[in-house]
Amino acid sequence: MRQAKITDYLLLILLALIWASAFFNIKIATYSYGPVTIAFLRVFFGAIPVLLLCYYKNIKIEAFSKDWHWFAMIGFINLVAPFYLIAYGVQSVQSNLAAILMSTTPLSSTVLGHFYTTNEKFNFIKTLGILIGFSGILYLFSDNLLIDENNFLSALLILLGSTCYVIGGVLTLKISKKKK
């Protein structure tokens, strides 16, 4: 493993800024477009640079193989569903709360990883982290200042979108092990 350089840290900061601003940008987009349009545009414009990179580097796209149905399912669960759920949820939730709710992804990945992978089992530290994390989620849902009866369903949809990323990751692990 190589030592990280200053460029690596700068790129990581840039990535964090881009990712963090996504919820703000989605919130703005919901004033003009519906969740389906936002999800479509995110997938479409995200696919263009990936396809160009694959073409430039001569990388075979395995989604067009005999296992295309696995790739379609992973693409739907890992891209389309969360993009739609998040865009729908952000209509009734502040963008900063959406970002906080999306930060629950490590919690759901720890839980699902325990049950659906062989090398990601619970230990004391992970269990403690899950308990602390879920207590934070419970606090968010119990505090009527952030989540109330008007945006409760939207907050749940954002959490479901976050969990879709984890399910897509677990499915990707399963298919990559199947390919070996």
Image (cartoon, grey):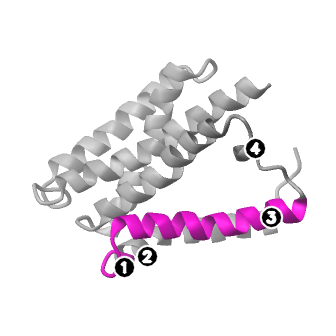
Q: Which element carries disc 3, helix, strand or loop?
A: helix
Rendered image: mark on residue 53: 3
Q: Please state which amino acid type lies under the numbered disc 2.
A: Asn
How many neighbours does mark 4 have within 10 angstroms: few (below 14), some (14-19), or many (20 or more)?
Answer: few
Q: Please state which amino acid type lies under the numbered disc 4.
A: Glu
Q: Residue 48: say if magenta.
A: yes
How many neighbours does mark 3 have within 10 angstroms: few (below 14), some (14-19), or many (20 or more)?
Answer: few
Rendered image: mark on residue 109: none
Q: Residue 55: say if magenta.
A: yes
Q: What range is drawn magenta here?
A: 29-57
Mark toward the start of the polypeptide (2 vs 4): 2
**In the image, residue 7 lies at what x, y percent?**
80, 69
Q: Which element carries disc 4, helix, strand or loop?
A: helix
**In the image, what residue occupies the spot 72% across and 62% down?**
50
Mark toward the start of the polypeptide (3 vs 1): 1
149 or 79: nearer the eye? 79
How many neighbours does mark 1 have within 10 angstroms: few (below 14), some (14-19), or many (20 or more)?
Answer: some
Mark toward the start of the polypeptide (4 vs 1): 1
CB-based contact (under 8 Å), mark 4 and mark 3 = no
Q: Which element carries disc 2, helix, strand or loop?
A: helix
